Amino acid sequence: MRRRPALLYDGECGFCRFWVLRWRQAIGDKVDWLPYQEAAQRFPDIPADQLSRSVHLVEPGRVSRGAEAVFRLLAYAGGVQGYWLKAYRSVPGFAPTSEWVYRRVAENRPLFSSLTFWLWGRQLERSTYHFPQWLFLRLLALIFLCAFLSFGLQADGLTGPDGILPAGDYLRSAHAQLGAGSYLRLPTIAWLGSSARFLESLCAAGALLSLLALFGFLMGPCLAASWGLYLSLVVAGQEFMSFQWDMLLLETSFIAALIAPWRLRARWNAQSPFPGIGLWLLRWLLFRLMFQSGVVKLASGDPSWSGLTALSFHYETQPLPTWIGYWAHQLPARFHQLSAGGLFLIELAVPFLIFLPRKPRALAGLLFLALQAGIALTGNYCYFNWLAASLCLFLFDDAMIRRLLPDRLTRDWQSPPPRSAGRIRSLSASCLAALVALFSAFHLSLLLRLPLSLPQPIGKALRLIEPLRLVNSYGLFAVMTTSRPEIMIEGSDDGKTWLRYEFKWKPGDPGKRPSFVAPHQPRLDWQMWFAALSRCQDNPWFVNFLFRLLQGSKPVRNLLSTDPFPNRPPRYLRATLHDYRFTSWKEPGWWRAKPLGLYCPIVSLRRENP
């Protein structure tokens, strides 16, 4: 009977036992795992002093040791592990270099044993991610639910037939210019219908799919369908659905559909097929999100970022601050400088810890979560912080989380590894990984101003799939706004007495306390912040907004908090610009408002006098 290969190692060395246990979990019973102290008599041809200095892999007709033995052993695990042996055999210089490294490690095992502890901790088993996967998928479903409901409440006023930017008009105009190519450039179900009821039905369908996924029913299909519905709304929503977190949700959910279980019901503690490449894709997405956010700040050349003064303005000038943001603004300038330095550390240096072993990776996760909590407490960024935090879950493995949960909930995690994710899903994940690598390399090269030219066929293929928003660039507040202009809209019947429209969430009444609204995003309020940073004529949607108010459009009026003309629209409208500043903690109220002049001159619709 042919014997299995046998690995001979030092059973009295903790460093050796650690790595043997990890290899054994990956390879299983394909190899016999034997401490040489117990099995040396079975292999009399191998000198005892050599057994004490290095591991030996005994195969039929062959004995290897050192780095070669390790690489030949890893080849039994299959997959990418086999590339180490191929490199050892064929890459010039790789074999002698790896053997030299192996000898140095073997000669200093106490040092590397301590280093192993600091990098991996005392958990000897290989990392698994059953609970992070379970929690991530349900958080994503919850985020989808909030996103669909949030936009559904505003869809009629923003993109309905009587809204600010009617989706139907937009699609008809695109088709007139692009013809059949518009269907590829603008992938949306709204081609089938663009009425308010149809758009709201898309949101309702998305909310229903999100609920099914939240409770574990058909998670993979539901997330894939939710991605398609949300992409349709992003396309139809135009400026109102063009925020970075909309792109992040699309990219995240597309990857999630590959790792989610596709069976009818997924129990909370059941193991699911989890393609390793899916884990890589999610970590790479988190890396890009964080690293690009830091790079854009430095690449912009903004002196407030390079001088570490940006956070002295941020809490006051961000789109929708909270009352905690008000108090954060009152902190000393030195604190803001230190915070800006810490922010750069987290965004530029810490992301590289994502690719290190367990303990540095967990440290990165804790720092990222702390950053997202700080952002969520001081500003309203809808579901962005939830989504970024959900990506951080894969920086913590089951061994870490097991310490925090009761044994009855984690018992199933110690079962054998889950079955294969399937050839089709693995192939899909591999294709997506190649796509992400190409796209993200191209985006990073542009961001870092490095020349990168793609072959023409690849560049053409990437342009064709770009409308699907599968890979995106990220980076908020590349240039810090140091002042806060606010647009106020006023109406009048006689051109002399002007009454102000109040928005639901953006600053208006100086005495109104900033509040929390996330994960809901009042998209008109957000767009008003952007509009105030540029000229009226640069924002056609704003002119449409005034036009709808003059028409008395009910869906648009419903987007506002108060309408001073409830019975009929005013004859005239104007938009004024004001400079808003937080009051000091000793002053009454929350804001100081200073008039700056007209933002948009008086406009009116010609109509007969009643």
Image: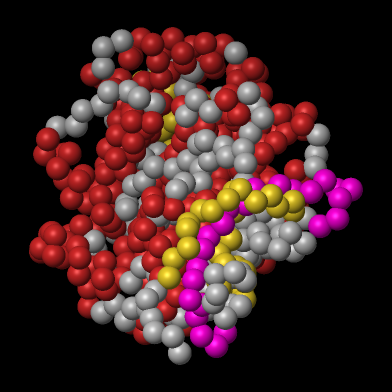
In the image, residue 411 above or below residue 247: below
User: What x and y, as percent, mark residue 171?
Assistant: 23, 68
**Residue 499 shows in this picture:** yes
* Number of numbered discs on residues: 0
* Viewer-closest of 228 and 240: 240
Percent position of residue 165, x then y: 36, 68
- Give how far across and how far down residue 248 sits, in percent: 43, 53
Please give the name of the residue rendered at 51% of the width and 43% of the height, measured from the top-left corner: 476
- Residue in the foreground of this view, choosing between 443 and 526: 526
Q: How is the image coloured?
A: secondary structure
> Quarter holding the C terminus?
bottom left
- In this rendering, would 542 be left or right of 485? left
Q: Position of residue 79 (x, y in %)?
A: 31, 41
Residue toward you, 339 or 89: 339
Residue found 39% across the figure and 42% down from its top: 473
**Residue closest to the eye, 308 or 568:** 568
Residues shaded magenta = 566-589
Is residue 573 rendered magenta in the image?
A: yes
- Residue at left 74%, top 59%? 510
| Residue 517 lies within the magenta run | no
Residue 70's image quarter? top left
In this picture, residue 551 sits left or right of residue 462? right
